[in-house]
Image (cartoon, rainbow, N blue to C red):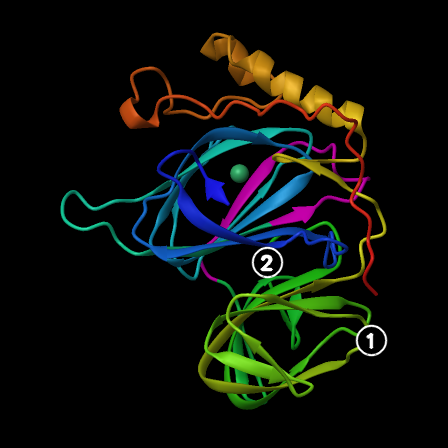
């Protein structure tokens, strides 16, 4: 999946999948890198979701329409709540000269439940996250709770996200009411005698109170989970909605902002991301919405237990 146009980074999308639109409220998982292509994603809109950015290598500058302008580094979490509408940009932080630094990271979306999806946009950065440890593992708890350790990140449904390091035999306590997914980042592991290498997303259904695994030395993986999300989502481009008409309106609102002067853009649905005006050089501009397909959009159905 190319991200951000011609000089695109190589991105691997492991969620949503056919038959598996969500794991808990997690509705999107991209991993990018490691490579030396600089991330440059111009302002674009979101609705109905939270974005979760977790760099593994390299630094990313995040700017958004709620006034944030921050750099996020490995070990730090950006979590942006789009609610009824937000826009943001993401650029690799490059050194003044010399070789591009290695870029690697994870970008995830969390669907907002119906009661929270029209809220005002918000942004949080967590520069220090709590660490959990147990039999054969240590983990950074990005969101939710693992092994009694709770992340300070604001979420709107029962979910967990953790960056886990382990080797040999490990046992992680899980919430049996949650379904879970595992994305191996480094090394490899086996669950229930089945090998899971780096790359594909492993899916674990509900009903597990622990995860027993056998890991190669230096194994690191992303654990995501949550209560199965009961609402059907209509995902198109950067929008998470429920109906075709709502997504069409979200698209029209973004396109309409293209021709507004800055002062009016700031007051419009998606606001204004500072620093991308006509004099911003390579950072000038915005990402236009693609055309809608000629058919009515429908929610993705779940076909996995
Ligand atoms: Mn985005």
Residue furthest out toward the bottom: 169
Q: Is residue 75 left or right of residue 304?
A: left
Which of the labelled discs sits on residue 207, or is there none?
A: 1
In the displayed structure, would residue 272 be above or below residue 205? above
Residue 66 appearing in the image: no
Residue occupying the point 64% across, 54% down: 15
User: Where are the magenta residues, as a range?
Assistant: 109-128
Q: Label 2, secondary structure: give it.
A: loop
Please state the horizontal and vertical placement of residue 50, each as a whole percent of the image.
Answer: 63, 44
Closer to the camera in the image, 89 or 119: 89
Instruction: Tell me, yes or no, whether the highlighted magenta stretch contains residue 65.
Output: no
Q: Quadrant of the C terminus?
A: bottom right
Please state the horizontal and vertical placement of residue 6, each as a whole percent of the image.
Answer: 38, 34
Task: Kindly identify which residue carries mark 2.
Answer: 152
The number of numbered discs placed on residues in the rendered structure image is 2
Gap between marks 1 and 2 measured at Cα? 26 Å
Residue occupying the point 67% across, 51% down: 16
Q: Label 1, secondary structure: give it.
A: loop
Q: Is residue 221 left or right of residue 155?
A: left
Front disc: 1 or 2: 1
Please state the horizontal and vertical placement of residue 24, each as a whole percent of the image.
Answer: 74, 58
Residue occupying the point 40% across, 21% down: 285
Which of the labelled discs sits on residue 73, or is there none?
A: none
Predominant SS of the magenta segment: loop
Please state the horizontal and vertical placement of residue 81, each as a whole percent of the image.
Answer: 62, 40
């Amino acid at each position: 999946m190319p991200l951000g146009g011609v000089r695109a980074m190589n991105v691997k999308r492991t969620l949503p999948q056919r038959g598996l639109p969500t794991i808990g409220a997690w509705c999107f998982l991209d991993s990018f890198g490691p490579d030396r292509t600089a991330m440059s994603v111009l302002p674009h809109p979101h609705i109905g979701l939270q974005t979760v950015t977790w760099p593994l290598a390299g630094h990313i500058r995040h700017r958004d329409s709620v006034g944030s302008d921050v750099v996020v580094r490995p070990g730090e979490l950006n979590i942006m709540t789009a609610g009824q509408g937000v826009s943001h940009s993401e650029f690799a932080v490059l050194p003044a000269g010399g070789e591009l630094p290695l870029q690697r990271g994870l970008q995830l979306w969390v669907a907002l439940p119906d009661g929270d999806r029209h809220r005002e946009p918000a942004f949080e950065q967590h520069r220090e996250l709590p660490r959990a440890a147990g039999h054969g593992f240590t983990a950074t708890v990005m969101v939710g709770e693992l092994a009694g350790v709770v992340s300070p990140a604001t979420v709107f449904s029962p979910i967990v996200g953790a960056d886990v390091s382990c080797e040999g035999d490990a046992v992680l306590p899980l919430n049996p009411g949650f379904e879970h997914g595992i994305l191996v980042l480094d090394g490899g592991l086996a669950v229930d005698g089945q090998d899971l290498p780096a790359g594909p997303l492993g899916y674990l259904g509900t009903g597990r109170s622990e995860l027993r695994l056998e890991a190669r030395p230096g194994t690191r993986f992303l654990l995501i989970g949550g209560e199965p999300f009961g609402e059907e989502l209509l995902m198109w481009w950067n929008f998470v909605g429920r109906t075709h008409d709502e997504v069409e309106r979200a698209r029209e609102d973004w396109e309409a902002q293209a021709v507004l002067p800055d002062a009016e853009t700031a007051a419009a649905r998606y606001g204004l991301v500072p620093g991308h005006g006509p004099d911003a050089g390579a950072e000038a501009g915005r990402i236009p919405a693609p055309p809608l397909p000629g058919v009515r959009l429908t929610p993705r159905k779940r076909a996995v237990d």
